Image (spheres, grey):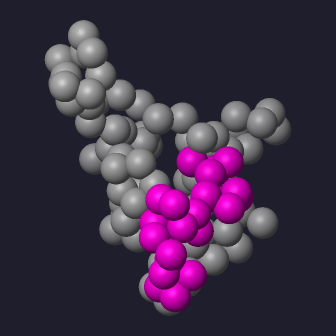
Amino acid sequence: MTTDSTEVFQFNKICEVLGFENVNEILFNWNESELSEDGSEILIYVDSRSYGPKTGGSDKVEKKEFIDWLKSDGPFDPEVYGEDIGDDNDWLRLIEKARNIIS
């Protein structure tokens, strides 16, 4: 399996086990993205004020980016999520479950 197909498999497994709502919660907290309606893609909605000439709509986010972030210290970065992120038991449990699925 190539690296990209590994991340796609891992992402799909996370979606299957955690469910649409939980995955969307993680994605939104990661970078304000969400699953497409059929769950096959990660979409981030762009705003023309933030992204220059792009006039809105959505862009796809690579599943590899998400998997890399999930495996990193990123989900617990106090500069992004606040100093108390380590005390958020729901967040800890959700990230731990996702990590266990792909380990």
Residue drawn at the location 43% of the way across and 40% of the way down:
41
> Would you say residue 33 is visible in this rendering?
yes
Q: Which residues are magenta?
A: 66-88
Residue 69, magenta (yes or no): yes
Above or below, comparing residue 92 to residue 59 in the picture: below
The N terminus lies in which quarter of the figure?
A: top right
> Would you say residue 19 is visible in this rendering?
no
Residue 84 spot, x, y in % from top left: 48, 81
Above or below, comparing residue 44 to residue 78 in the picture: above
Left or right side of 100 for 78: left
Above or below, comparing residue 77 to residue 43 in the picture: below
Q: Nearer the viewer, residue 41 or 47?
A: 47
Left or right side of 100 for 1: right
Q: Nearer the viewer, residue 38 or 24?
A: 24
Left or right side of 6 for 91: left
Figure disc tally: 0
Residue drawn at the location 61% of the way across and 58% of the way down:
74
Residue 70 found in image quarter? bottom right
Residue 100 spot, x, y in % from top left: 70, 73
Left or right side of 38 for 6: right
Residue 94, magenta (yes or no): no
Furthest-top residue in this view: 53
Residue drawn at the location 54% of the way across and 35% of the way down:
62
Q: Which secondary structure type mostly characterizes the magenta part of the structure?
A: helix
